[in-house]
Amino acid sequence: MAVDGGVHLSAITKILDETQPEGLGTKVPLPHVLEEGPFAGFTIHSSSATVNAGDVIRNQIDTVLFTHSHLDHISAVVINTAGLPGSRPKRLVGQECTIEALKTHVFNNIIWPNLSDENNGAGLVTYLRLAEGGNPAIGDGGGKGYLELADGLGVKLFSVSHGHCIERKPTRGSSNFRYGSFDTSSTTASPRGAPGSTAASGPPSLFRGSGGGQEKETISVYDSSAYFIRDYATGREILIFGDVEPDSMSLSPRNITIWKEAAPRIVSKDLVAIFIECSYDNSQSDDRLFGHLTPRYIIQELQALAATVEMVAHAPPKFDSTKKRKREAEQGASKANNAAVADGDDRAISPKSTRPAKKGSSVAMTSPDHNGIDTPHIATPTAEVSLTELEADTSETAHVPLTPQSANVLHGLKVIIIHIKEKLVDGDPPGATILSQLQKAESEARLGCEFIISSTGQSFLF
Ligand SMILES: [Zn+2]
Ligand SMILES: [Zn+2]
């Protein structure tokens, strides 16, 4: 199983090149079982790292979990798939909007051939659309809601926000619903610093004349994903984020939902590592984040996680959550129905959702708390530890940055930093700057977690 595939074959080739022994096929007989590196235990049949990497992709990686459809996360998988057909279709997995984007904008016989097994395609890939928050009908105990997508590995997906855009479109008809989305026709608010922000002074609905027609501004939040991946044998889990923005900057703050899901697993020591992006160091200004994180926002998010962990750890181990689950399930069904009824002209062709503002919230939305946003998410019955009380607490106070009361709440947790953007200038490598900024902030916040800067070819054993 792979998560995203921006580099894929070339990175695997590099790893094999660096870990294959000298003299393959002469001093070292083939086939050979690799003894070093992330592919230790894998049998290679060639002295060529490129050929062996092709073997890995063709025969070993069955499933690719996509966090979102941006090019840097899909390009290599898209390009390599045609050249490396295996004996069965590769499974491309993601939330519905990600899959629809791949289907509509990539494998569409224009940008790339339709290699899928839908719409009369070539059948080299097959799509699997995951429900947000897991599938409550599958699995039980600690593995409830996890879908087994590789032998012994279960997966649960959550949506996260990865920036937003403001689109201007001619108005047509009465409804502008996207699948799983909400109409924003009464919304003109923008977050602070956003270009074209007119929320504080603008009317509740903005229509602009253009060439005799009318245009409507629509704010769309771009949906990315985070995956919990669970090893059934040990019960251990990792959490991998795709590109993600901080809740404090988001029009649709959803990281807190993930922290609530993660907190009981940190308390039980099952969640051992979080892979999270840090695209820039702290010198990047807020208006140039483009839906990404910097060290200061990672610390802010981890403080929210730590505060949630504290609440779970100190919560009385009781209460019947059945009623709440039932209520959530009903609400979820009702939202789904609304979306289905209103689903009009603009199907889920792009991984973004339009979000509504509650009445009178436009001023609030220009402040960092974005308190007026109704964040839709499919209700997820949580497993052993229900978080009803936290739910009430945090939804009322989501605009107040959460901070833990005690030190070292996240002790033992590894936070692995991914998606560091190269600056392409002389000076310290960006990873070194980011690590020192994280460590400095951590020493003040006293979270207790360990930061690791990821690098190509690294392997982790938890
Ligand atoms: Zn992205
Ligand atoms: Zn990216």
Image (cartoon, rainbow, N blue to C red):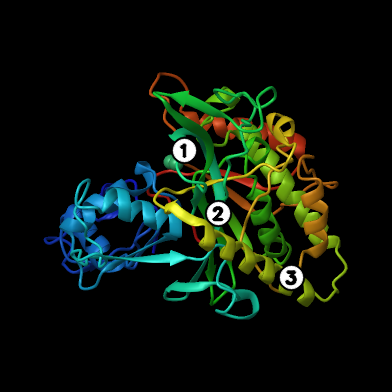
The three-letter code of the residue at mark 2 reads: Ser
Numbered disc 3: secondary structure: helix
How crowded pointer 1 is (Cα within 10 Å; few <14, some 14-19, many 20+) is rated as some
Q: Are marks 2 and 3 in contact (CB under 8 Å)?
A: no
Nearer to us in this view, 39 or 213: 213
The three-letter code of the residue at mark 1 reads: Thr
Name the residue located 76 percent from the left edge and 45 percent from the top edge.
398
Question: Is residue 47 rendered to the left or right of residue 227?
Answer: left
Numbered disc 2: secondary structure: strand
Pick whichever of labels 1 and 3 is earlier in the sequence.
Answer: 1
Query: For mark 3, what is the residue?
Result: 327
Question: Is residue 247 rendered to the left or right of residue 119?
Answer: right
Which label sits on residue 91?
A: none
Query: For mark 2, what is the residue?
Result: 159
Q: Are marks 1 and 3 in contact (CB under 8 Å)?
A: no
Name the residue located 20 percent from the left edge and 66 percent from the top edge.
120
Pick whichever of labels 2 and 3 is earlier in the sequence.
Answer: 2
How far apart in space, not on screen, are marks 2 and 3 (Cα)?
A: 21 Å
The three-letter code of the residue at mark 3 reads: Arg
Numbered disc 1: secondary structure: loop
| Quarter, ligand 1 | top left
Pick whichever of labels 1 and 2 is earlier in the sequence.
Answer: 2
Name the residue located 62 percent from the left edge and 69 percent from the top edge.
333
Marks 2, 3: nearer the viewer: 3
Nearer to us in this view, 392 or 332: 332
Marks 1, 3: nearer the viewer: 1
Please state the horizontal and vertical placement of residue 350, each as a whole percent of the image: 41, 48
Please state the horizontal and vertical placement of residue 213, each as a whole percent of the image: 43, 29
Q: Is mark 3 within 8 Å of ligand 1?
A: no
Which label sits on residue 171?
A: 1
